[in-house]
Image: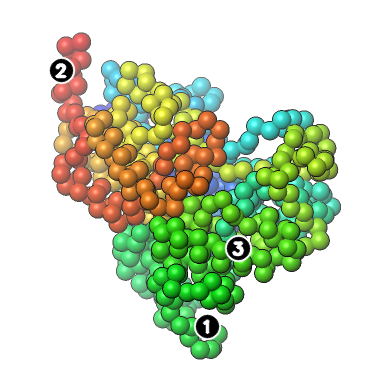
């Protein structure tokens, strides 16, 4: 590889995607530099330290599959691990593979510019340092830019302001404090029970009721972990061939540890084959999570509403106060519209004497005052205000990076009507720039660790192919990019994700002024992965590959 640049590859982001990209690229002999805004590795799990933060994928599956040694040596304490344990895992990976020596921390990228005549990418940092590379990999994460709504008087609040997406590293004491939290999405649902246990009083400002199901609370059993370790090659293959990247592997040894009792009968395939009373009884017996086992709810409106009503009845039985229960019931959209939320004691929290629910649809926020939040019904006095208002998902970090491609076109301008990318891997007009789990890939609809490894492997193999074949640059053909975007939207059509009543961050609906376009790929990981592999087998079909001599000839003509 030519050495006219500072590095062969610069990777932006030091989370799980950036760490794996560094590992793979370095092992291929490339000079690599990772630029990370935080003070250490971990990405999402470095910033999201709020109380209750936890993964919604089983720990043994939310793990790297590239190292047999790593699989065998790491012990997970819980079935679904909490943020501190996931961050410890990230740090262990960084230590074990000596990754930090090639990561530049506390470095925020504010400009990514394609130097056309040199076929290089120039990256500028917040402190005005400039670095160049032949290739640039944006591993900036899908949920990495916190969204804070523009509320009147927000800057006037004199108490402490926190955001779940950028929680302080140091411990936060809420003992004796009057705490308010805005938002009841995934972060809010996880944080609310924890905040209620510590605060003197917690006021929950709910914008939209949420569908949430109980999370597995079990400690990890050694027998289960041992059996996973024994079968990891099989499990990784099962992950790659599963719609959402989760194997569903059931350890035989775990059966001996389960409580005794008669086996439960298998569920019918169609929820509509049950009466309403039977659905409610099923929820009573197996919890709200059982409703997700009926595949028809994701595409059949009638089946979806049957599940929704059973869910609502289940919530009514969990919450003591009927008025509060009614406010917590989602009625304007259905199960499957948004990413499924797992909770620990969410509904039980509203039975506590020190918790108040404010339904902002009935009692909207008028303004933030120096001493609290004013709604139509009056001022709620607060000492601490927590924003659990989510992220500018999928595209936020990319659009804030100041990316400029060929001819000086900004990514912001190209995506002014919504993101357009080929396979979520590359963007037309931005040669040699790669995105990890970008829009148009399964990403957030999948086990992120499996999606990350698939993307990084594809990118690293692509760079090696270019080098081995004397190819100077690669980028999507505009028509291939357009066809893929159309395919992404076609596959999503008819599912609950794009139902008229569904306004999720998958569509950018949580960000004022953001174009409404469905961003992740609903076709499933196996279908997506096979398409990526087919494209490579066809000589990178849909991409324009330019040999080095072609660029030199074009420059001499100009």
Q: Secondary structure at mark 1?
A: loop
Residue that appears at 15% across and 17% down = 553
Q: Residues within 10 Å of mark 1 (few under 14, many from 20)?
A: few
Residue that appears at 32% across and 39% down = 485
Q: What residue does disc 3 label?
A: 312
Q: Earlier in the sequence, mark 3 or mark 2?
A: 3
**Which numbered dot is residue 553?**
2
Nearer mark to the viewer, of 1 and 2: 1
Q: Secondary structure at mark 2?
A: helix
**Which numbered dot is residue 258?**
1
Q: Would you say 234 lies left or right of 477 here?
A: right
Q: Residues within 10 Å of mark 2 (few under 14, many from 20)?
A: few
Q: Is residue 514 visible?
A: yes
Where residue 139 sits, quadrant-wise, is top left
Are the two marked residues, 3 and 1, in contact with CB atoms closer than 8 angstroms?
A: no
Where residue 314 sits, quadrant-wise, is bottom right
Q: In the rendered image, which quarter contains the N terminus?
A: top left
Q: Earlier in the sequence, mark 1 or mark 2?
A: 1
Residue that appears at 49% across and 26% down = 110
Residue 483, position in %: x, y? 26, 38
Nearer mark to the viewer, of 3 and 1: 3
Total number of numbered discs in the rendering: 3
Using the numbered discs, state the Cα–Cα distance from disc 1 to disc 2 in whole angstroms. 70 Å
């Amino acid at each position: 590889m030519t050495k006219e640049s500072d590095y062969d590859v610069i990777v932006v982001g030091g989370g799980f995607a950036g760490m794996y990209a560094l590992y793979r690229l370095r092992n291929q002999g490339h000079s690599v530099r990772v630029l990370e805004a935080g003070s250490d590795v971990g990405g999402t799990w470095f910033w999201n330290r709020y109380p209750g933060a936890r993964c919604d994928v089983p720990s043994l599956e939310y793990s790297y599959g590239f190292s047999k040694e790593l699989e065998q040596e790491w012990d997970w304490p819980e079935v679904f691990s909490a943020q501190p344990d996931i961050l410890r895992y990230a740090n262990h990976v960084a230590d074990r593979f000596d990754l930090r020596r090639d990561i530049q921390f506390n470095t925020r990228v504010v400009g990514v510019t394609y130097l056309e005549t040199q076929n290089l990418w120039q990256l500028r940092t917040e402190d005005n340092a400039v670095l160049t590379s032949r290739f640039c990999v944006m591993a900036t994460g899908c949920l990495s830019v916190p969204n804070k709504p523009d509320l009147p008087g927000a800057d006037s609040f004199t108490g402490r302001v926190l955001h779940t997406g950028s929680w302080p590293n140091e411990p936060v004491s809420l003992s004796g404090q009057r705490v308010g939290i805005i938002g009841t999405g995934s972060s809010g649902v996880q944080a609310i029970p924890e905040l209620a246990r510590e605060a003197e009083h917690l006021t929950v400002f709910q914008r939209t009721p949420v569908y949430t199901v109980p999370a597995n609370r079990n400690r990890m059993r050694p027998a289960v972990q041992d059996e996973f370790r024994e079968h990891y090659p099989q499990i990784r293959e099962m992950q790659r061939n599963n719609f959402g990247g989760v194997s569903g592997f059931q350890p035989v040894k775990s059966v001996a540890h389960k409580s005794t009792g008669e086996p439960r009968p298998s569920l019918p395939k169609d929820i509509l084959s049950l009466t309403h009373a039977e659905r409610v009884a099923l929820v009573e017996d197996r919890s709200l999570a059982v409703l997700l086992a009926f595949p028809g709810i994701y595409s059949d409106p009638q089946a979806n509403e049957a599940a929704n009503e059973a869910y609502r009845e289940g919530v009514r039985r969990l919450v003591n106060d009927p008025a509060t229960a009614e406010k917590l019931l989602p009625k304007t959209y259905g199960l499957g519209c948004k990413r499924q939320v797992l909770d620990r004691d969410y509904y039980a929290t509203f039975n506590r004497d020190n918790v108040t629910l404010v339904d902002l649809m009935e009692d909207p926020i008028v303004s933030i005052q120096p001493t609290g939040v004013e709604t139509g019904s009056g001022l709620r006095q607060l000492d601490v205000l927590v924003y659990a208002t989510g992220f500018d998902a999928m595209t936020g970090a990319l659009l804030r990076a100041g990316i400029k491609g060929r001819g000086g076109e900004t990514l912001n301008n190209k995506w002014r009507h919504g993101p357009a990318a080929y396979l979520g891997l590359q963007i037309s007009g931005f040669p040699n720039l790669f995105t990890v789990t970008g829009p148009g890939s399964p990403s957030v609809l999948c086990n992120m660790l499996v999606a990350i490894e698939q993307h990084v492997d594809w990118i690293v193999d692509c760079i090696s192919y270019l080098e081995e074949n004397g190819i100077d640059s690669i980028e999507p053909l505009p028509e291939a990019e357009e066809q893929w975007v159309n395919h992404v939207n076609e596959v999503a059509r008819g599912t609950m994700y794009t139902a008229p009543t569904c306004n999720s961050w998958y569509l950018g609906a949580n960000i004022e002024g953001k174009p409404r376009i469905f961003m992740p790929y609903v076709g499933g990981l196996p279908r997506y992965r096979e398409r990526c592999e087919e494209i490579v087998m066809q000589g990178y079909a849909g991409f324009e590959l330019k040999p080095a001599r072609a660029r030199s000839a074009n420059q001499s003509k100009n």
